[in-house]
Amino acid sequence: MITLLTITFGLVGLDRWVLPTLFAASMGADLHLNAGDLGNLVGILGVAWGLSAFFMGGLSDRIGRRRVLVPAVAAFSVLSILSGFAGGVVALLLIRAIMGISEGPVASIGVAVAVECSHPKRRGSNNGLFQCAFALFGLALAPIIATQLLRVTSWRVVFFLVGIPGLIMAILIALTVREPKTTAAAQQAAAQGLAPGTAPAKPVRAPFSAMFKHRNVGLAMAGLLCAMMGIFVLSAMMPSYLTGYLKLSNQNMGFVASAIGFGGFLGQFLIPAISDVWGRKLVSVLSFVLSAIFLWLFIRTGASMGMLFGLLFVASFANFGALALIAGPLAAEAAPLGLISSVAGIVIGCGEVFGGGIAPSIAGGIATHYGIQYTLWFALLGQLIGIIVSLFFKETAPRFTKSGKSGGASALDISPENLAGTLN
């Protein structure tokens, strides 16, 4: 299941980030679109993704993972194919908005499924493995795949080709994914002292407000926003910064910019795994510190390709690692009974709407009025605020909370005392 989730989330990244490359290569000229249209296409998907991650995540907590996840994977794949038939910006905006709605659940439900099928000591590593493919497929491989395919076919056919694998994954997920054996109802029955398989006398679903009982939920929303300020501003503005401000050639720009994807891939995989051993709080603080230091060094570096690549690689490694840690195990371990996907959804949704939708727009305004180079300082600001937010996280890694006292009732801490407290 982890393998299928990893490949599927990688395809989400591929379908999402293949558009900017196709836009720059030929699509924008063919459809007579400008940079503002590109910004709107990227932004509308991010906002739709964020809202959907929360609402669809909550729906999966009610009706099951498979019933939401499979249609979502099939839908974003079909919409990728339909992008190749678009004749103008209005059609593309509609398609990308619906695509964001269908991609959002893959993130929030994927976190929940990865947690539910993992041993407690491997929650971080399995979540990191699941999430790391997004950066690898979307920001490292998508430009390469798109430009190579454009050598033999049109951008319309590229959209068609990248959509087909998702349909295959939807079928495999439908055959593989299983609903968690320990459902909220079963946990409630256990708390009421009922025999296994017996429905609770008074089925109770944790209210919406219960999601914020653990302080890490609100902090995770703020922390993920900080992480995404760095990721999305850098991803959107880096090509223009390298060619327009540092005057690198297109080929050299592509080499340096790929550091975001390759560094992010390793960071999303390794940093959550490290947090299984060192703890969520310490690793989140160190990730933001490392990202801030190397981004600051990158800002102060001239047109030296090797140095630029190395600094951006490490900054992206830490930045994406913080994102994976906060959106995955840290958010899931703060969730109340039956609301793992809902909590992951609201955390991811907040980060996407503001970090993926609004922050790039603000960066665009900064670039227009003050210069492209100052957008990197805006991304750095997000990392510095992230350090402060992370200092207030409460430790929830199982290695450090064997007593079950993680600072609040969690869906992943199912001791009778915790269950009873949550139900009360």
Image: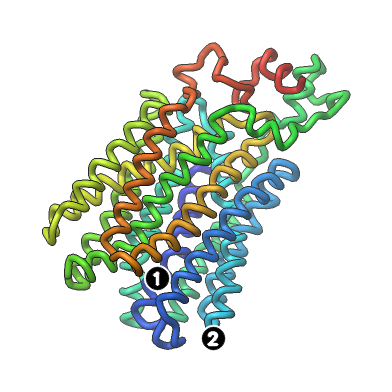
Q: State the mark number for residue 20.
A: 1
Q: Position of residue 49 (x, y in %)?
A: 57, 57
Would you call the spot at circle 2 few (<14 residues within 10 Å), some (14-19), or many (20 or more)?
few
What residue sits 51% from the left and 14% below the top? 402
Q: Position of residue 38 (x, y in %)?
A: 44, 73
Locate residue 255: give its quadrant: bottom left
Quadrant containing the C terminus is top right
**Residue 162 or 298: which is nearer the viewer?**
298
- Disc 1 secondary structure class: helix
- Disc 2 secondary structure class: loop
Q: Amino acid at mark 1?
A: Pro
Q: State the mark number for residue 187.
A: none
Q: In this rendering, is residue 265 above or below 420?
A: below
Q: In this rendering, is residue 368 above or below 323?
A: below
**Residue 243 or 382: which is nearer the viewer?**
382
* Residue contact at pointers 2 and 1, CB within 8 angstroms: no
Residue closest to the far right: 201
Q: In this rendering, is residue 19 above or below 26?
A: above
Locate residue 199: give its quadrant: top right
Would you call the spot at circle 1 few (<14 residues within 10 Å), some (14-19), or many (20 or more)?
some
In the drawing, does residue 49 fall left or right of residue 13? Answer: right
Q: Amino acid at mark 2?
A: Gly
Q: In this rendering, is residue 253 above or below 89?
A: above
Q: State the mark number for residue 87.
A: 2
What residue sits 47% from the left and 43% below the top? 224
Q: How many marks?
A: 2
Q: Position of residue 291 (x, y in %)?
A: 29, 42
What residue sits 46% from the left and 81% below the top? 156
